[in-house]
Image (cartoon, rainbow, N blue to C red):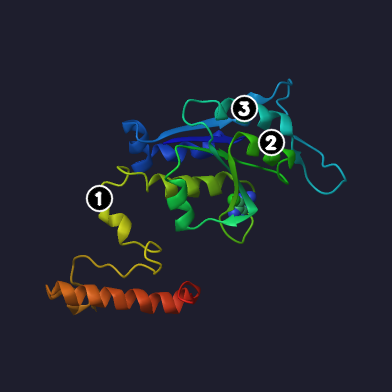
């Protein structure tokens, strides 16, 4: 899978060289490339923003650098029509289902906005190059798309076959079956007077599976009743 990220703060993404995603990049499963939007400017000051038409607070990202950057990235051999994602608090909410969907794509391009946003015509133009998605991490506001894209790339990247060593660990996770994960314990069996639930030491795999299921349902009801309502 090919993933391109465009940002005016490319060093945010240094962390993606670490851990499982770093390994996936080294092995060639994931071709992840980070691009500086300012490399697509043509003035001496490498300007990426300007004041909003109609007035108002803050600055808006200019369309020209985005047009150049998207033209270059959409024309790669990675796919005919990339999926172009703009992180935005005004977008659809990112879920595990979104991650599963995006993990099947050949080529993702993420465009990280800053300031008050990107000139609206960029989204219209991008739709000529690929499928455009505006995606939010949740109902709160970040200063820009970078942190949101880090989260999305990690959630998507770990679903690419071969990135997570043991595929079973992908199945037994919060949200994969619509429920929160069951509690986990390891040695010692007693720690600071607290015992591991005895059923986990019983060796009865059927009873353990049933107990874990109950725990999942109980936790989901207590913490995330919204997940059970449909
Ligand atoms: Cl994707 N971007 C920004 N700037 N803020 C957010 C977000 C995205 N998702 C939640 N808050």
Q: Residue 71 shows which numbered tag?
A: 3
Q: Residue sitting at 43 percent across and 52 percent down? A: 100
Question: Residue 94 appears at what percent x and percent y?
Answer: 53, 55
Question: Residue 176 appears at what percent x and percent y?
Answer: 38, 61
Task: Please give left or right for residue 13 compared with residue 181 in the image.
Answer: right
In the rendered image of this protein, does residue 140 appear above or below residue 85? below
Q: Name the residue under label 1.
A: 166
- Label 2 sits on a secondary structure element that is helix
Question: Residue 111 appears at what percent x and percent y?
Answer: 60, 39
Local packing at callout 3 (Cα closer than 10 Å; few below 14, some 14-19, many 20+) is some
In the rendered image of this protein, does residue 210 appear above or below residue 113? below
Furthest-left residue in this view: 203
CA gap between label 2 and label 3 equals 10 Å
140 and 111: which is toward the camera: 111
Tag 1–tag 3 contact (CB < 8 Å): no
In the rendered image of this protein, does residue 80 appear above or below residue 158? above
Residue 191 seen anywhere in this rendered image of the structure: no
Q: Nearer the viewer, mark 1 or mark 2?
A: 2
Task: Please give left or right for residue 108 compared with residue 176 in the image.
Answer: right
Q: Nearer the viewer, mark 1 or mark 3?
A: 3
Q: Earlier in the sequence, mark 1 or mark 3?
A: 3
Q: Residue 125 shows which numbered tag?
A: 2
Task: Please give left or right for residue 187 compared with residue 129 in the image.
Answer: left
Question: Residue 24 appears at what percent x and percent y?
Answer: 34, 37
């Amino acid at each position: 899978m090919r993933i391109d990220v465009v940002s005016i703060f490319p060093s945010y993404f240094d962390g993606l060289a670490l851990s499982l995603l770093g390994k996936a990049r080294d092995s060639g499963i994931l071709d992840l490339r980070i691009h500086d939007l300012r490399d697509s400017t043509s003035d001496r000051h490498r300007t990426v923003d300007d004041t909003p038409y109609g007035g108002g607070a803050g600055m808006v990202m200019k369309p020209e650098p985005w047009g150049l950057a998207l033209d270059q990235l959409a024309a790669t051999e990675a796919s005919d029509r990339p999926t172009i994602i703009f992180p935005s608090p005004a977008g659809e909410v990112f879920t595990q289902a979104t991650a599963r969907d995006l993990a099947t794509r050949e080529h993702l391009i993420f465009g990280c906005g800053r300031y008050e946003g990107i000139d609206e015509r960029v989204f219209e133009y991008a739709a000529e190059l690929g499928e455009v998605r505006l995606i939010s991490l949740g109902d709160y506001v970040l200063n820009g798309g970078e942190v949101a894209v880090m989260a999305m790339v990690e959630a998507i990247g770990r679903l690419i076959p071969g990135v997570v060593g043991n595929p079973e660990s992908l199945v037994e996770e919060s949200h994969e079956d619509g429920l929160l994960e069951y509690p986990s314990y390891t040695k010692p069996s007693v720690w600071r007077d607290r015992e591991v639930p005895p059923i986990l030491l019983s060796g009865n795999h059927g009873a353990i599976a049933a107990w874990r299921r109950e725990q999942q349902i109980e936790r989901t009801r207590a913490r995330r009743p919204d997940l059970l309502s449909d």
